Amino acid sequence: MGHGNATMEAPTTGGSEQVPSVGVPDSGEPDSGSQPKGRPLKGHLAGLDGLRALAVTAVIVFHLNPNWLPGGFLGVDVFFVISGFLITTLLLRERRDTGRVDLPGFWKRRARRLLPALFVVVPVSIIIARTVEKDLLVGIGRQALGALTFSTNWVEIYAGSNYFESTSPQLFMNFWSLAVEEQFYLFWPLVTLALLAVHRRTGLKEGVLASCVVLIGLASAVLMVLEHSAENPTRAYYGTDTHLIGLMLGAALAFLWTGPGRAFTIHRWWRRLRPWLVLVSIATLGGLLYFTGEEHAWTFTVGIPLASLATAIIMLAAVDRPGALRTVLELAPLRWVGQRSYGIYLWHWPVILIVSATLPATSGSSQFLWTRLWAVLVTLALADLSFHFIETPVRRRGFRETGRRVWRAVTLRSKVGGRVALGVLGSLAALTVAIVLTAPDTSSTQQTIERNASASPSKPRETTPAPTFTGKKSFTMPEGDEIDVFGDSMVVGSIPALEYYFPGVQIDGESNRQWSDGLEAVEEADDSLRRGVVLAFGTNAGTDPETVEKIIDEIGPKHMVVLVNLHADRLSRIDEDNAELQRIADEHDNVAIADWDDAVTPEDLQPDGIHPSLGGAHTYAATIRQAFADLTYKHTGKKPKLEELPRP
């Protein structure tokens, strides 16, 4: 998601006070070694590294466990606002000071800022992932292409990926926002120059230009509303055309900030309302981070624009003048994280996936917390090394000079060192290419599902009316030939275990099903529906309470119904989904929950953290059997004796 990239530099704007440096200067700006001690570095605005740190922290917390901060992905929009503001300010300042904008120079500085760390993260992540878990490399060729060309968002849209519902982890999933920003860096300077040309020829005020920019952002927000789909919001979320509101608000603020009105901060009403605006904006942004979620349509239609607006107000207040807000944002730990936010953002998601693969743990356990802490520590260490030894040297000296210095250091004592270094780099490049070319096309989870589906092809449903029972007889422990199972890929992945635990069971399972498909299947079953019914949907699009209720009504009160709940550490909606299922079960006397979420262990899961492994399929089936036993005891007062079956 979002990152710190070029926003490490903050250009001075006309009439603004010089503030202490909060980042490493770009090439062409004063180096810290040339600046008198205690003097502020030219071209940097205080408080923004702290805001950047809070944004990257929100994103990381969301990726560590979506339940901890369901709206943490909005941290990307905080980055977008900062980037829009700083990049536009840089362009406006250069145009004001020199009478022109050096576009090749601008793009060259962006390349210095973005490419070095990226060229390290991609191959290193691919090589380590290959040694840990091959499933992390599914689609890696497409992902690497998107990452290295800053087109991840469009590549993944074309591939049909789902950012919020992915059951096959993507190693470079977070690079989508880098793509949006880089595309912004390519085209926005041209738009800015066009606006400045209009300004010069017509004399339009900065406020009018800013309004034009805001209109672009609003048009993008409207397009997001039109493109949004509850089943897969990725097109609306990933699209550069649909996700411009934050960048445009930041850019509009830059037009106002560099004008004579200083974005209204010179007015008395701003000074009077500033504390309240800041307080409301902080509360709004904090509330959105905590209460929004990908399952809510309003997150995309209202939440993202609102988070962007709140960020713009907070940012303006921070750069406007010293105060409590700036003091907090200038705290040393926040500045440290903010300065390294680009590297932190690049590394954190591959690190989380690799750590999760090497140290599997279920959400809520102490082991899970320790693995998450370890992922954070590794991310910070890698980002710090990248900041000092990769990003800063290239940003200050450029690619050629940095390359010369590295080569001189390697060959200082012997030319053999240079040959060895070239050999190592060539070998790593060849290894990376070989891994990409030999990466699996499908995950082990998908292979298991396809294998089970092939081994147990769908059979025509028995249409003979099922026997009916009354009273307690309806709730005695059902045999396998008295049970119908309807479900999605979770069921398909568990077919052998379900047939093992329930001989004669009738299974109707297909991948990518939703609750609406379950309703259709139950309606088609009609009076052939068996006495025991298992419903296992929701993996793909969550719980649909209204449809679940319709299915239960269609089944009727004389059937034993088991709802299998969900488990997925990387989906923030799981707790809410399971709470809805539990509520529905509590309201129906003939319904019980198969608590797969509570029963599952790390060993029970495929690498995707969602579907059951070979042993997990047995846990899945055993959990369903226990739910039937609980229903039997509830209605008959007798506990069924469950035979302990050997497990693989």
Image: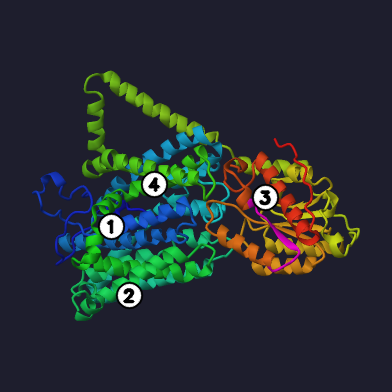
The amino acid marked with disc number 2 is Ser
Q: Quadrant of the N terminus?
A: bottom left
Cα distance in 3D space between marks 1 and 4: 18 Å
Q: Which residue is mark 2?
A: 211
Q: Nearer the viewer, residue 461 or 176?
A: 461
Q: Quadrant of the C terminus?
A: top right
Q: Which residues are magenta?
A: 587-596
CB atoms of marks 4 and 3 within 8 Å = no
Please identify the quarter of the rendering in which residue 255 is found: bottom left
Earlier residue among tags 4 and 3: 4
Cα distance in 3D space between marks 2 and 3: 51 Å
Cα distance in 3D space between marks 2 and 4: 34 Å
Q: Which residue is mark 1?
A: 50
Earlier residue among tags 1 and 4: 1
Q: Which residue is mark 3?
A: 490
The amino acid marked with disc number 3 is Met
Q: Secondary structure at mark 1?
A: helix
Q: Residue furthest left?
A: 36
Earlier residue among tags 1 and 2: 1
